[in-house]
Structures are given as C-alpha cells and as structure tokens.
Image: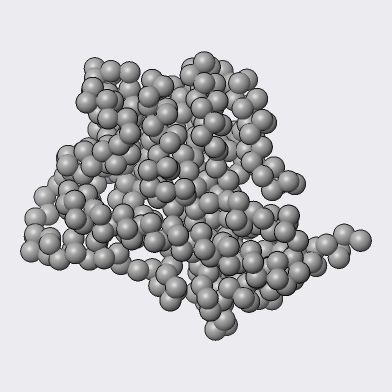
Amino acid sequence: MFKHIEHYAGDPILSLMDAYNNDPRTDKVNLSIGLYYNERGETPVMDAVSQAKNQIKNDQSSLYLPMSGMPSYCQHIQHLLFAHAPQAITEKRITTIQTLGGSGALKVGADFLKKSYPTSKVYVSRPTWENHISIFNGAGFTVEYYPYFNDTLGTLDFNAMITFLSTLEESAIVLLHPCCHNPTGADLTKEQWDETIKVLKFKKLIPFLDMAYQGFGKGFNEDLYAITAMTNAGLTFLLSNSFSKIFSLYGERVGGLSVVCTDKEEANLVAGQLKATVRKNYSSPPTYGAKLIDVILGNPELKQIWLIELESMRIRMKQIRKNLYSQIIQLGGEKERFSFLIDQTGMFSYSGFSPKQVHDLREEYAIYLVKSGRICIAGLNEENIARVAQAFLSVNNELVVSAY
C-alpha cells in the first residue's frame, strides 16, 4: 500500500550520529550534534536537576496537563526570558505555553502564523539551523533567506542583512537568533539589534525569535538583550525557547512558546489560538521535565546552583575556543583564518571548511562535523584538542596547496 511513497533520506545530523556510533576507531571525535559534553566526554546531569529529581521522586501523579502546559512552569518561562521587561508581564500582554522542546515551539508557532497570515513568507538567515526550514515548509510556508554571514570574510554581514530586511513587505515573518547563532556563533551587537528593531517596527514585520542557548553566549542576562529591547520597543513577536541544552534535559522535551502582544485582550485571543493549535498537534505536553524545571526555578537556592553550573559551562566552552585557537596558531596556522574560534560565541563555531574538507576530517581523522562545517565546541576536551588542532590545520593547508 505504501511502496509508492518517497524514501526518507534521514536527518543529516542524526544520520551523522549513527555513522559516528558505528565507527570502530577508538580516537574518533564527535563535533557534530549540539550536545554539551564535559571534560570526560559525558553529557552530565546537572546538580540542580539531580536535586530536583530527588524532591519529586515520590510524586506519582500522571494526569494530563492543560493544553497550554503547567501554569507555574509557563510563569517561570516569562520571568526568566522577560526579566528585564517586567512591565509586559504585569500588563499581561505576554502569553506563554509549554511545548515539546524548541522544535515543538517552532512548529506550534509556525502553524499559528500560517492560520493568521496565510500569504506571508518566512525569511531565515543564510545559514540557519536546517530544521528551521523543514518546520516552516511543513507548516505550508514558502521559506527564503536573508543575508547574514559572509563566508569569504568569515564574519557577520550586517549591512547586507539590514538592507535586505528593509525591502520586505508588511507582515513578512523573520526568524532571528537572539544569541549563540546556530550554526555560525556570530551574533549581532546591541547597536545592531537596536537598528534591526527599528527596521522590523517601521516595516511592520513579524519577528520570530528562537532562543535555545541562553547563558552560553555573553552571559545569562546579557543574552536577553534582543528580547528585552524588542519587548520594550512595543513590537509584537513570537519567542520559542528550549531548555534541552541549558538544563541538559535533552530527552525530556522541555520548551516554551511566548507571544508578546500589544495588550491583554490580544494576548488572550492568541492564547486561545495556541491552545487550539496544540490540540490539533499533540493535545498536551509531557509532565516530568516540566516538574523538574518548575522545582528548580521555583526554589531560589536551586536556581542559583543551576545558574552557577550554567555559567561554568559557558566559561568552559569559551576557554576551549581559546585553547584550540592557541594550539592551531602554535602549529603555524594563520591568525586571521582561525580567529573565528575566539570571535564567535556559544556552543557552535562556523569553520568555513568545505564539504570536501569535512569529508576528509571524517574519513582520515575520525573527526565528525556536519556538512556545513559547523563545529560543536563542547565536544572538545584536553584529550582530543591537540589532535583536532592538527587535523584542522592539515585539511586547511591541503586546500591552500591545491589552490596553486
């Protein structure tokens, strides 16, 4: 009955994980998927999470949550993400629902927007996380790119970006990364965000912010700048957030979708439509992960333990960048070529390696990167960093030699 259907080629990143797991080489290094690894190459259970698990271990309740999720969990999301725009919370012009991770938030948001603005197009940065395109295509949108990163220079091309956004039609949907841009790690400055917000407001565009790495960039509060500035500027926008990375709760599917509205009445209307969208997708979100986060964010002591742990993760990744850069330079690498390692922020770096170089790293050195050349910085540690530095320099020099 189904032999006529199209073959699914698989998700490129998850397929790469399968290849890595099946690779028999003992010195293999996984720099592909976005997981935070500690110095021992483990995905750690955070101490705050362990304590929260212990607190709810006797809680056996398993009733359905409301369509919008656990109310206190949603309140914590608002106070976390809009901490520096409290008036919007007080005015009740933000509506927030619990979602199945960040991807679930994006999907619910996409479905909601398709019903509300059926003729709008969605614009994503070139490059962006590949699933952004799949999610919005799946909701029925035409997805196009806006300029973001200059591959030749290895830097953010803000002038090209802002010029392009200025040409868009009213109600065009623009997907933006508030911090720790995936896959480039190249973020807008505060001044650039301010200019971007002016264009978004003047052109009456619909911003959709995707926040998956709060605390991994400049710092927990610093990473909120775009959200705060956009809220205080009076824009209406959507915000998806994921707790997968920053709580190391990958499999619990904990996230949220917030919509900042003009007033309480509009927020109530949006809340109803988000519930209707959830009902048509999965009816209600899971309970366990939300309980854990609710306990942590509702307990000042546990929240502080979590924030300290999160900051230590950020500092470690920043130090890894410095160490990798230093080792490459000591081996003879050009500072300008590899400065991206210390200029970019967050979990990912955009190496500029070609698909052939990525292939060579995998086949010759057992180092796994995604095809775009994105590096997951957290996959590096003291044991593998020297070999990775040598391999990066080797494939880079091969390209230089082949150009002559």
As displayed, is residue 256 above or below residue 89?
below
As displayed, is residue 372 above or below residue 170?
below
Q: Residue at x 28, y 18 (%)?
A: 263
Where is residue 160? Give x, y as percent.
67, 31
Image quarter of residue 167: top right
Image quarter of residue 240: top left
Render colour scheme:
one colour
Residue placed farthest to the right in the image?
A: 404
As displayed, is residue 369 above or below residue 275?
below
Q: Residue at x 70, y 71 (%)?
A: 330
* Image position of 191 (left or right of 93): right
Where is residue 200? Give x, y as percent.
51, 22
**Which quadrant of the rendered structure holds the C terminus?**
bottom right
* Image position of 157 (left or right of 317): right
Identify which residue, 262 or 22, lies in the foreground.
262
Q: Residue at x 33, y 39 (%)?
A: 81
* Whether residue 356 can be seen here: no
Q: How many labels, in total?
A: 0
Where is residue 53? Give x, y as percent.
18, 63
Q: Residue at x 56, y 18 (%)?
A: 169
Where is residue 164? Give x, y as percent.
64, 26
* Whether residue 387 can be seen here: yes
Identify which residue, 199 or 332, lies in the foreground.
332
Identify which residue, 19 or 102, lies in the foreground.
102
